[in-house]
């Protein structure tokens, strides 16, 4: 009689192989396991397939993955598993936040799960749900669509009520029993307004992402301070998609194509990626920075040569990650929720000059 054929996924085969290796005693707690590349070669599998197998073993607290170091056999402490969920891992902000967090977790002998929401609230909720099923007790979340009703704010509330310890980064939703590490975004907006005003600019603009709470706070504070100072004209320009779609370029082109008499002479960008796109549009329109248009950004991000020119606010990225972990671990050990506000440092360069009399 012919036996039944059992079809098993390749990631399942890899997972079972590693479990058998551990059961055989070949590896002890703390030992380093084969690299992703070695497993890819051994099983003729893609990197994605190997990582799925390793992710499943991580969720089961069988192994621990340390970025830049490799994969190791877990010491078996299920309570030492923290999930870090970011908006978009390819952003220039989040890798540094994760780096700061991972370093702190490693020193405290905690294991890290890393999730990428890809700026999708549905995917964000799915990842959080999977982590809850796996028994993760501590979460660090940089929520997507944080300024909109599409956010997972209510779901985060539910998780917190169930006893899950949570630290939000870059967003303060003022949720009971939830900690947060945020920047003083209001300071950034207000300071940018004051700098422009002190340089004689009376027609200004702000470009920001309306779905992103920090961006909304920076823009709102900028506009409010400009009104207090008596600025003649304020252009408030928002977009609701990723800045990497080119949306800021369309807004920048619209603003800088206005007649000279009403065109803004200074623009505050909610982040440096937006400021870079503004600079590209200015170049196409033969406008000079800062002679024709003054610009202030936010983040002090790695945006090429323009970084050497752009006046901006430094984002303490790694410190955000470290603080988030410190607060979370304190909560896991019985501590109370905390709110930490980090002040961004103004970095003055050469993208601002005195406004021309017009």
Image: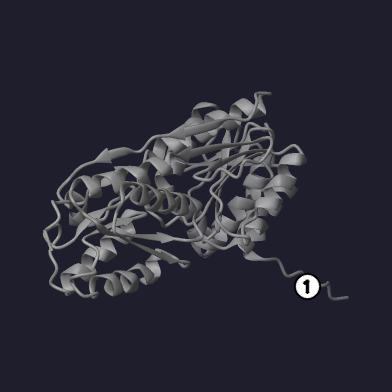
Q: Is 348 above or below relative to 334?
A: below
Q: Is 79 above or below relative to 237?
A: above
Q: x, y percentage for residue 159? A: 72, 45
Q: Which quadrant of the view contains residue 358?
A: bottom left
Q: x, y percentage for residue 89? A: 46, 55
Q: Is 285 above or below relative to 166?
A: below
User: As drawn, is 22 to the left or to the right of 106?
Assistant: right
Q: Residue furthest top?
A: 334
Residue highlighted by disc 1: 5
**How many numbered dots are placed on residues in this image?**
1
- Helix, strand or loop status at disc 1: loop
* Residue at 29% across, 58% down: 232
User: As drawn, is 137 to the left or to the right of 169?
Assistant: right
* Residue at 38% across, 66% down: 244
Q: Is residue 128 visible?
A: yes
Relative to the observer, which residue lies in front, 167 or 210? 210
Relative to the observer, which residue lies in front, 139 or 14? 139
Q: x, y percentage for residue 54? A: 59, 51
Q: Is residue 134 visible?
A: no
Number of residues whose C-alpha sits closer than 10 Å to that of mark 1, classed few (under 14), some (14–19) or many (20 or more): few
Tell me, what colour scheme is on the image? one colour
* Residue at 52% across, 35% down: 324
Q: x, y percentage for residue 68? A: 42, 43
User: As drawn, is 4 to the left or to the right of 216?
Assistant: right
Relative to the observer, which residue lies in front, 36 or 337? 337
Image quarter in which the N terminus is found: bottom right
């Amino acid at each position: 009689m012919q036996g039944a054929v059992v079809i098993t996924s390749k990631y399942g085969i890899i997972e079972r192989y590693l479990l058998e290796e551990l059961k055989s005693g070949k590896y002890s707690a703390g030992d380093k396991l084969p690299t992703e590349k070695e497993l890819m070669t051994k099983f003729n599998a893609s990197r994605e397939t190997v990582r799925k197998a390793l992710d499943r073993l991580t969720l089961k607290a069988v192994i621990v993955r340390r970025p830049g170091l490799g994969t190791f056999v877990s010491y078996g402490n299920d309570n030492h598993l923290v999930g870090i969920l970011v908006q978009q891992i390819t952003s220039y902000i989040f890798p540094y936040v994760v780096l700061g967090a991972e370093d702190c977790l490693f020193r405290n002998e905690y294991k890290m799960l890393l999730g990428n929401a890809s700026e999708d609230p549905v995917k964000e909720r799915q990842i959080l749900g999977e982590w809850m099923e796996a028994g993760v007790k501590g979460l660090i979340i940089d929520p997507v669509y944080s300024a909109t009703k599409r956010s997972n704010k209510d779901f985060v509330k539910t998780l917190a009520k169930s006893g899950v310890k949570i630290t939000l980064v870059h967003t303060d939703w003022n949720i009971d029993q939830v900690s947060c590490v945020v920047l003083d975004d209001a300071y950034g907006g207000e300071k940018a307004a004051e700098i422009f005003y002190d340089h004689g600019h009376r027609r200004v603009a702000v470009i920001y992402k309306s779905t992103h709470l920090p961006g909304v706070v920076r823009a709102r504070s900028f506009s409010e301070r400009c009104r207090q100072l008596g600025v003649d004209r304020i252009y408030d320009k928002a977009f609701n998609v990723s800045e990497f779609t080119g949306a800021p370029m369309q807004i920048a082109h619209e603003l800088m194509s206005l007649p000279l008499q009403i065109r803004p002479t200074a623009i505050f960008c909610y982040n440096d990626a937006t400021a870079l796109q503004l600079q590209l549009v200015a170049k196409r329109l033969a406008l000079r920075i800062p002679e024709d248009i003054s610009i202030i950004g936010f983040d002090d991000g790695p945006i090429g040569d323009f970084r050497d020119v752009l006046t901006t606010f430094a984002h303490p990225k790694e410190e955000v990650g470290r603080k988030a972990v410190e607060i979370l671990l304190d909560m896991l050990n019985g501590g109370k929720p905390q709110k930490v506000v980090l002040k961004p440092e103004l970095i003055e360069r050469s993208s601002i000059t005195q406004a021309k009399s017009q």
